[in-house]
Image (cartoon, coloured by chain):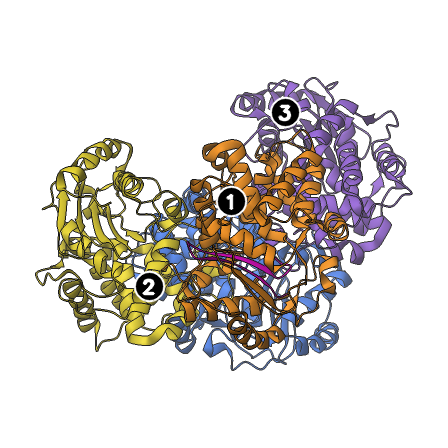
Chain colours: A purple, B blue, C yellow, D orange
Amino acid sequence: MSCQSSEELNELLLEAKHYTKYGTVADYIPALKKANPHDLSAAIYYPDGTCLSAGDIQQKMTLQSISKVLTLALALMDCGEESVFHKVGYEPTGDPFHSILKLELNNPSKPLNPMINAGALAVTHMIKGKNIEERFQRILHFVHELTGNSKITYSQEVAKSEFETSFINRSLCYYMKQDGIITEDVEELICLYTKQCAIELDCFDLARIGVVFAMDGVEPMTGKRLLPADIARLCKTFMVTCGMYNASGEFASKVGIPAKSGVSGGIMGAVPNRLGIGVFGPALDHKGNSIAGVKLLEMLSKKYSWSMF
Amino acid sequence: MSCQSSEELNELLLEAKHYTKYGTVADYIPALKKANPHDLSAAIYYPDGTCLSAGDIQQKMTLQSISKVLTLALALMDCGEESVFHKVGYEPTGDPFHSILKLELNNPSKPLNPMINAGALAVTHMIKGKNIEERFQRILHFVHELTGNSKITYSQEVAKSEFETSFINRSLCYYMKQDGIITEDVEELICLYTKQCAIELDCFDLARIGVVFAMDGVEPMTGKRLLPADIARLCKTFMVTCGMYNASGEFASKVGIPAKSGVSGGIMGAVPNRLGIGVFGPALDHKGNSIAGVKLLEMLSKKYSWSMF
Amino acid sequence: MSCQSSEELNELLLEAKHYTKYGTVADYIPALKKANPHDLSAAIYYPDGTCLSAGDIQQKMTLQSISKVLTLALALMDCGEESVFHKVGYEPTGDPFHSILKLELNNPSKPLNPMINAGALAVTHMIKGKNIEERFQRILHFVHELTGNSKITYSQEVAKSEFETSFINRSLCYYMKQDGIITEDVEELICLYTKQCAIELDCFDLARIGVVFAMDGVEPMTGKRLLPADIARLCKTFMVTCGMYNASGEFASKVGIPAKSGVSGGIMGAVPNRLGIGVFGPALDHKGNSIAGVKLLEMLSKKYSWSMF
Amino acid sequence: MSCQSSEELNELLLEAKHYTKYGTVADYIPALKKANPHDLSAAIYYPDGTCLSAGDIQQKMTLQSISKVLTLALALMDCGEESVFHKVGYEPTGDPFHSILKLELNNPSKPLNPMINAGALAVTHMIKGKNIEERFQRILHFVHELTGNSKITYSQEVAKSEFETSFINRSLCYYMKQDGIITEDVEELICLYTKQCAIELDCFDLARIGVVFAMDGVEPMTGKRLLPADIARLCKTFMVTCGMYNASGEFASKVGIPAKSGVSGGIMGAVPNRLGIGVFGPALDHKGNSIAGVKLLEMLSKKYSWSMF
């Protein structure tokens, strides 16, 4: 059984919305502070093109950590699995996303997985292109393909705000530069990374990205393959084991779908072979996930048996 | 398509067997050192009762960490999800299974998940019974039910050997006793825990346990429900995110099935709705998983499309 | 210039006493909770036998961590410097006294110094004797010699209370047992260790111990050498670098004398070639040192130029 | 009794020189790799102006971490003790000098002491001046005063080499920038820091710096006070507790004098009220101290009773 109508979706959304009051908007990136903590919107996209939505679906958000899945896919297409995992590990971690501990404790140092900041920076470092601009255009183009929406661009304000305050990310980069994981100029990499994080879209777009992953890399309406099946599946594996920061285990237990969240409050989910879902709710729990967004996904998963487990 | 015959299974097993030479038998538990590093055997059990096998299927092994899944299931039946996860977390960790770091670093201290030693000890602590003996008999009885084999008992030699050398486990217990996670006598808990680890069975038995988890808790031949579906599914979630020690992420990427390994060289796997599998290969890789066993599962998963992802 | 009279000492003590209100009595050892947080007493002992005192000098306290210096001296006499430092390091640490982190992070594992709990347990393990009782009598006898007070004994109540609640110490012991640092029965070692911590004396006694260290091992009135000069000096080195828990650096900067504190609120200090001092003030700061005791020593050091630096 | 002649010093130096073969020249700063591992030279400077020397005394070295003591003194004069220790701690640490762990683990984050890289960077950040150039000239001028040698300058080659490879130091700076410990531009601070590390001098110069600290801040020949006594003494305290990296405890036990070493192989020592000593031996032990230099100081301390303890 599937969620059949936007009304059904809206009913659950209204219930989940009560949880927004227990969360807080991310404040470590100045430009994110402006979000309204009470917002909550969601869109579901089925392979047959049906689309349901609830909440103020016009609301835009920046990709933030959700971009980590897309750059991982791109880096895998650019460099192959072996090269990518020569520089970054496969393993989930109980540490917070911006932790630097393991870089010092593990020797030789290698970020544990591509979904924590250190790993994502190492992955973006591997994306090919003549220069930062070309590399960013490749990422953006990939987003256009995945969403079918070529109007998507990035928020210069958010990118600038993050660029100016990304001290921990620079700290992670220099630590990895010492160990040869990163070889390019750190300021350039941070510039590219903050732009990828600042790509701006809405729940519809996220749901369309989700359905491509759900269908193992094929855009279901056009039948066009946007990424190889094995790469899509590898990405979904990381979404399950590390997609929701250090709450991934609990999310796998309670929701059980591949998903990736960002500190903007976005969540992109993929229910294998069934649907893609995009959620936006900027009030976050203390681990950095949309507090009402997670609740909504939990209710949907229970009601419509989405869990893979 | 399924693996149709023991011959097919045997062919892959012979290929995987080449990898035994790159592993070493666990040496930190004296009684495990006697194992032959070149052994490799496997059994597959289908819901229709068909059973395939390859290698010296008579070989017995002790459950070791595989028992962590079974005690988790039992504790969940005894105490409920909320109580259990009040004392142990849901999150995978990049640390080795016997690590104590996080108990000091996380405050209040709580083992990150039930598949690392600290978490498994906290889980066994929650299993109900008048005394150690009764609690152990309940675990053993649960193994009898899951395997349909009431002859299974435990190796007194292995239990004794582990009891005498379980210093890190005692260290973990006392640390948790300080924080109120464990309240019973540590020597008694270690006695119970080493017995559960020393339960002795073979690949057939493991495969039959696997099929029960694969069928969400129902023994497929008898149709008898041995554990509630939600508990079976929760256990499978942990098997995916943390079942293969700190190689769980790589195993999820390359094999993609819920599985749990033990330092004896056993692996119990569950391919949802399709089959259970038991593998025994005592030569371990440096993270503590059967090196040839993992290889065999990787080949099987690729050939017969077992991955959930 | 020296502190010439008990009146002078008392004046400073009354000033220091104001700080007792900012501290709290140790609560992790049940028997210590009974102490009056407003108590503060001190005694100074000069090599010529002059003794000054202030406060309620009858007040008794247990040695707690102060005993670590005495067992270090005894172990060095029993086993020699090389053997002792084969099992324990020379280095101060920024970690709290009961931390277990470094035992896992440093490989091979060895407690960083003899003044943290792990190191002190390893040192007590090295004290010779047929059995626990004989080893304890040797420690007690050493205290009798150092203080010239053969009536000193231990508080059975405190020893019992600590024995029953020493979970972290047991955790540290078992971790070290795994690494071969400790080889004896852990319960026996904890029994011995909690007794040494429960030896009960007053400020006079502490001051007399201090003067022996100040005089490089010679009891100044009798001229009797109680420990070799090089051992006395080694002990004073550790008192400077690690004697005041993870506030030793600040204490060295502000007071500058070899000193060792205990969570009972005692501090034993040795001003080289000049005097010994004993202080008792059970209200502790957050690092475990007597808050008013440290203040008193700071005032005395400033006024009478005690600092070695 | 003092070391009376250069011949006496030379005798011990020749003996210590045998240890150079067990060490290796620092290789993480490219420009340091060129040093001859077999070099060893030393100079002793007495308050009366007598100077002894042994070995090839013309050999120049860069200050490296020895500069940390001088910038600490300068920052204390610029900002006062309270301000300085608002941003950096007093406590020794068992971690290596470039460790970042504690910055993440301690919250709020503050480098443990001014002798580890994080702390030294925070200290240099506090040195006043209109710009990098003026701040550097102030440091250099202070070195001229301390040594009485106004010809001293810095090695542009070493500064450039370190500037280009100081990735861990940048990582530490950005981490501290996140926490507000450092507020200036990181590249500028690294530029200043690498210049201070590249100040080039010889053993005579080091010995003259040492004697000023030995005399509590007064240049003994001229009688001119170069720094306040309490600052000189505070610096000596840190030299004892943290001056020799994470071998400071062992050095305090075996040598017992305030000293600071650098990875160039230099050691500056101060025997309170007696003498200053400079040693240069580029072959390092695994903790980063001159292996033969430490041996020489140990022999000198034993023979001439230099230890403060």
Q: Amino acid at mark 1?
A: Leu
Report whether mark 3 lies on the same chain as mark 1. Answer: no
Given the image, on which type of amino acid does mark 3 rest?
Pro
Question: Quadrant where the N terminus of chain D lies?
Answer: bottom left
The type of residue carrying mark 2 is Arg
Task: Judge from the rendering whether residue B244 lies leftward or rightward of residue A194; answer left or right.
Answer: left
Can you tell which mark lies on residue C233? 2
Residue drawn at (66%, 77%) of the image: B20
Check the residue under mark 1 and report the chain it is in. Answer: D
Mark 2 to mark 3 CA distance (whole Å): 62 Å
The residues tagged by marks 2 and 1 sit, at their Cα atoms, a distance apart of: 34 Å
Query: What percent of the width, then of the height, locates residue B72?
Result: 47, 54
Mark 3 crowdedness (10 Å alpha carbons): few <14, some 14-19, many ≥20: many
Q: From mark 3 to mark 1, how far is it between C-alphas?
A: 28 Å
> Circle 3 is placed at which residue position?
A282
Q: Which residue is mark 1?
A: D105
Task: Kindly identify which numbered label has been placed on residue D119.
Answer: none
Compared to residue B277, the image places residue A154 above or below, namely above
Residue C117, visible in the rendered structure: no
Which dot, 2 or 3, sits closer to the camera? Answer: 2
Magenta-span inclusion, residue B258: no
Q: Majority secondary structure of the magenta segment?
A: strand
Within 10 Å of disc 2 (Cα), the crowding (few <14, some 14-19, many 20+) is: many
Residue range corresponding to the magenta coloring: D262-281
Residue B104 in picture, x, y percent from top left: 44, 50
